[in-house]
Image (cartoon, rainbow, N blue to C red):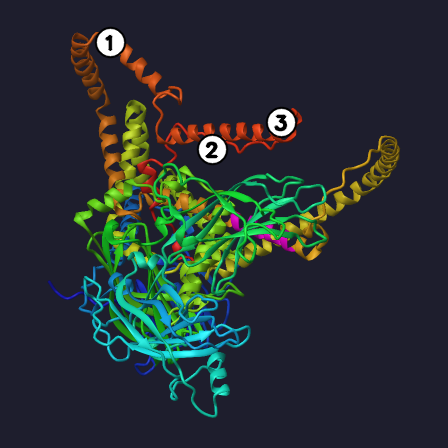
Amino acid sequence: MGAKKAEPELGSFDCVHSERGKAPSVGKVHIFKTSLVFKAEMFGLDNTTLSIKRRDLDSADATSRLTLKMTYKDTRQLDLQFTNTNKPYRCLVEGWKLKEADDHEGFAVNEKQLKKEGEPKHHGEGVERYVNMAKDYAEESYEDFNRKFKKVLQEVSRLGAKIPPTPRLPAIDCEEAVSRCLFVKIHRAEDVLAMDSDGFSDPFVTIRYRGLEATSTTRMKTLNPEWGEVFTFRTPPGKEELDDEDQVELMVYDRDFALNDFIGYTKLSLSGMRVSEAKPQHRREWRQLEAMPKDQESDFFDLNHMKEKLMFWEGERLVSGRIEIETWVGNRHDDEFRVAGIPRLKQVDAAAERSVAHYVEPVTALLRVEIKKGRNIMALDEDGASDPYCEVVIVDPLGVKPDESQSTHYIDDVVDPDWDRTFNFIVAKPYSDDMVLRVYDYDGATSFDDLIGTAVIKISELAVHRGIKKPPEEKWITLLDKDGSASNAEGEAYGDVLVRAYLDEDYFEHLHGGNATGEVGRLSVDVVRASELAVPVTTFAVVKMGPYWTRLPSVENSVAPEWNQRLRYPVFEPAARVTVALFEGTATSCRFLGRVKLQLSTMEDGVRYGGEFQLMSKDPSKGDVAKTCKLHCGLQFDYHKSGALVAKKYMEPLLPDKWYFSPMQDEEKETIMKAQKEMIVQRVGNASPPLNDLVAKELLEFSKHEVNIGSIKSSIARIQRLAGGFDQLTGAMTFALSWDSILVTAMAQAYIIYLVYYPNMLMPTILLGVALYSLALFPSRYQRVLDRMVADEWLSQGLPFPPPTEEEERLKKEREEEEKKQAEEDEARKKAEAERGAREEEEERITREQEEKEATEARKKAEAYAKPKLQEAFTWDSINPLASLQKQMAEVYAMITLSQNILDEVAGGAERLAGILAWEEPRVTAGFVVVLLVLAWMLIYVEAVTRFFVKIILGVVVKTIFTIISPATIKFGISAGILFVLRHPAILPDEQTKVVQEAKKKAGREAAVAVEQANAATGDDAADKALLVPPPPPAAVAILDPRPLPPLNVFFRMPTQSDRLL
């Protein structure tokens, strides 16, 4: 076959191509018989080439003498600038036989466009007419099919992205690295210096390791203190054995009111201690206290060290005493970690920023405190009673964290108050805080309340409640004064408080990783490099996977930083999210550049999702989104046991069982979740190297717990985008019935007629169509996962779709028409308002007279029947306008936050429904498609299936059953089963019913005892009226299981577009 003949050229012209946002291109336009091509000619510096097919051209506009505007494919536009547009315009009109407008000089349209606008085309007469019509239809159908087929091929080639090969990179097991801990236990000290005038000291110990510092408690008035306290430090990553750089410094001080006195110093080398041994290697030894080394560098804020230098600048002094220390390398899941002290960041280690650092979120627990009632509370008022209330405070003994408190209401004039209040706090391992109960006598808002007594309980000593069975027993707690006495100088007791306090480590089990027993798979995260940074800067990457955090080393002054690091994380929840974020700056000051984020449930087993992803950041003040750079990374999720553990996890609820059996209020739940994230921000901020608040809050999505109008706009945009899918469906149905395509419309009408004769095929056809639509999306699932990893630029700005960039002239005309129409409506409105003005003025006069008459009568009536009002109790909020305003603002913020969370849940639910067919979660879509196909098959053969059940099941099976078992026996069994399910709670009660019954009995016994005590004290029946109502029993347990069904558990694990919001 010979070569294809070159297409004749009709003309070529020098011009300049201009496009918005790009530099102009100088070149030449070549007009051929069936196409137009623009080629840049700038000595090889610009390779721009554009082309338009003759069949795609809609119009050519040369009304401007210098610019030729060509519109093609309905919405696209090509602008070319000439010294004079007359010659290229005439060449285009005459060569392509364009139709010029009679009333618009310099404007021409294609005949195809005229046909679309309804102008009939002359095809001749007789047989020739039908032949020409058939030719035109065949040509148009071919061109339309060819254009659509090319578009489909282009889309398939884009979506059907190839899976990249897995590169070879050094790997780190993050669970193993982050779980290794150095434990330092301070046992005791002997013969320390006496620094106070009474011959004693108040010693405490400060421990320092790699820029972190921990402080023990103070032992008062002793020279031989005993502590027995454990502290934990993170071991340096990548080390299998500690070396000479790993040294623990201990400084013993005497606690004073101002600056503390130095007692002694010692340094302990950890060289040779193995990090990864299965059995910990304990080192316990006595160390002699020494003077502070002369070469010891002190920080500016180390005032204790400064005091030592100033007091003994003339010479050295003698130091005596020794201290017993124990060190070993263990695991964060060890029992010692539960009570170990957490160090604070003392000095930022610059070397730590140049190495990989690992962090882990603390294991959190719910601290539930039930303040039941008081007994024999000391009377402080003149009437022989008090107005007591109880305050629960969570106190950090070291004073690092602020106190967190909640209080009951006060009760007037009682000594045995019945509060019956429950408070929830969130605490984290190690449980180093104290729970303090303070009982006050309320004296009104204008006076300070009198403290009756306190009780201090170490949280680490509280019982741990597991499961949903009966919680720990209540205990009477005796109130003490500051000296630890239970009574005052006159022997009057401060009273007791009945409290039930316990730790519930199951309640927040989904927030932390726990141990490796629940692991369902492993995730590999490859962070390779970043590119296309504008200027050389210092950058670092942070990876967050569930409770695990990893900070990659800082790369200084580079436009293309490289890390080439693989991180492996255990996966406990397949619906967890992994985030790879990039930041510019240092540990103390940085700027967010963007992130790659993905929910693991969208990934297939063993498939690597990788490539270069566009990073974007959002300006919080303006709300604009800007592209910053690109990040090359990859993700791979490997299931354990071929996905059996993942499938089992899918059948379980997303939240622990206690969230359903013992739910919290939405407002309290929001407060607890925000407190948990604040705790994480504080923990990673005190690590080495620290992660500042911006990094931590960005990865924790802290803005969801704050007022964020952008979040509301984004949720509305997500709903609008989903509604756009219905518009596409409506457009497709309109196209099928509009004769735009004769073949499609004919097939649609034939199908409608077929349904008239076979209506039972309607549902099977719909089910098959939905299944085929989902199967058609199957090849593009990989590319959609890659798209999901990148932030959505438009949803982040509250826009459902990209803003239009073309057809400006059409929009301008529409605006002019709307303005004209609006002007006419305004004119008519003004005329109507002028006519209505006179009527309203008269009506207002009549109404005003009537209102004045009614107000006069109401005032007289109120004066005649006025009664004295009760005096409301003064509160601090009522007399302090600033406190009242703050309370109102807090309520408004809480309402707005709740609204944005509700909108996010609504949008997320709709996106999950739409994602069932779009392979957003491959396992869910595969199962749904199978169900659709099975249902369609069953509906097609419904008659055969019905005959099978009627003839075989009812005719054979039922007859056999009734032959073996009599109908009376079956009826008795069914009746007995129904009666057992609806039985009285006292008959064969289950565990939860037992708890309720025991609580009722206990409440009855306590009420009877209270009646007897009151009668014995007063001797009359009036005491019964003065008694407080006993605490109500627990609410009845629901008959049905409150946990969601397994299909809903799968549904809640599907991804949403909220992960793509900045």
Highlighted magenta segment, given as a residue range: 886-898
| Residue farthest along the left direction in this orientation | 1
Q: Is residue 561 shown left or right of residue 24?
A: left
User: For the residues marked 2 and 1, what is the alpha-carbon distance in whole angstroms?
Assistant: 40 Å
In the visual, does 55 lie left or right of 957? right
Residue drawn 28% across the image and 24% down it:
758
Q: Secondary structure at mark 2?
A: loop
Which of label 1 and label 3 is nearer to you? 3
The main secondary structure of the magenta stretch is: helix
Element assignment for label 3: helix
Q: Which residue is mark 2?
A: 1034
Gap in angstroms between the C-alphas marked 2 and 3: 24 Å
Three-letter code, disc 2: Pro
**What crowding class fits label 3: few (fewer than 14 Cα within 10 Å), some (14-19), or many (20 or more)?**
some
Q: Is residue 799 left or right of 755 when viewed as pictured?
A: right
Label 1's element? helix
Question: Residue 476, can we see it?
Answer: yes
Please name the residue shown 51% across and 75% down the image: 196
From this view, report whether residue 466 is shown above or below residue 707: above
The magenta stretch spans residue 897:
yes
The image's mark for residue 1024 is 3
Question: Up-down: is 913 above or below 980?
Answer: below
The one nearer the camera, 329 or 259, is 259
Give the percent coordinates (x, y) of residue 65: 50, 72
Asked if residue 15 can be seen in this view, the reply is no
Tell me the kind of residue under disc 3. Asp
